[in-house]
Amino acid sequence: MKILVIEDDATTGPYVQAGLREEGHSADLVTDGREGLLQATAADYDVLIIDRMLPGLDGLSLIKTLRGAGVRTPAIMLTALSGVNDRIDGLEAGADDYLVKPFAFGELAARVAALARRPGLQEQETVLRAGDLEMDLVRRKVTRAGQEIELLPREFRLLEHLLRRKGRVQTRTMLLEAVWDISFDPQTNVVETHISRLRAKVDKPFDSELIETVRGAGYRIAG
């Protein structure tokens, strides 16, 4: 995903940006509220991570302005203010989630992944395609070169996730969170096993391979 981090703390901002990049995301960092507002309206982001106390324009005002301008990009607010009323203010301003400092990066990454799974963020296509592979989401049917492919429910979900992000590398952690709803590493080879099974059905019987392994990074469907 493409994520904008709006955070003025000299330690927290770079830490979050680096962590997101390690997860395979594209992450930009700005340290001023007004600059963040301009960046969020000028570029197409999947998720915004916004500090509440910002120079130039505070986080609440930033989100209110974005929503008033019709920008519906999902937003997570980061703040040291942990009171119930503070949370209510953030959500009523237009934030989709609210995370109190100090926080664990793993929890932030899981919340970002949860926002990505919301129907409003995902493409609303009913048919996904890559080359001669076609997935009909309504009929729950997968074909390649006109030949129907029988997939188990988890295989279908894994393939759908990869197709929705065609051309983008998906790390093992990202797949665990999106397909298995696991926000920690269970130290199993469940991802590798399902990728292997999926390849046996989607790639091996055909002339070309669509599911690529990006060494040291993860997997992707060729764009």
Image (cartoon, grey):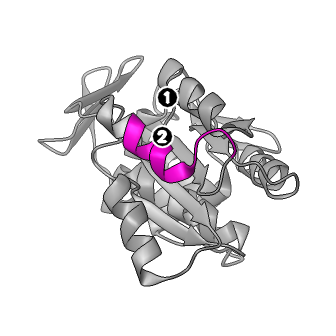
Q: Nearer the viewer, residue 3 or 155?
A: 3
Q: Nearer the viewer, residue 89 or 23?
A: 89
- At 65% from the left edge and 59% from the top edge, which residue is drawn? 173
Amino acid on which disc 2 is placed: Leu
Q: Which residue is mark 1?
A: 166
Q: Position of residue 72 (x, y in %)?
A: 34, 38
- At 39% from the left edge and 57% from the top edge, which residue is drawn? 96
Contact, mark 1 vs mark 2 (Cβ under 8 Å) = yes
Q: Is residue 182 visible?
A: yes
Q: Nearer the viewer, residue 19 or 75?
A: 75
Residue 163 belongs to magenta span: no
Image vertical order of residue 139 relative to residue 143, above or below: below
Residue 57 belongs to magenta span: yes
- At 71% from the left edge and 74% from the top edge, which residue is drawn? 104
Amino acid on which disc 1 is placed: Lys
User: In this rendering, would 144 be left or right of 41?
Assistant: left
User: In this rendering, would 153 be left or right of 34?
Assistant: left
Mark 1: which secondary structure?
loop
Q: Position of residue 68 (x, y in %)?
A: 30, 35
The majority secondary structure of the magenta stretch comes to helix
Question: Magenta part of the protein: which range?
Answer: 55-65
Mark 2: which secondary structure?
helix
Q: Which residue is mark 2?
A: 162
Q: Nearer the viewer, residue 43 or 136?
A: 43
Q: Position of residue 151 (x, y in %)?
A: 32, 51
Give neighbour class at mark 1: few <14, some 14-19, many 20+ (Cα, 10 Å): some
User: In this rendering, would 215 be left or right of 157?
Assistant: right
Picture quarter containing residue 67?
top left
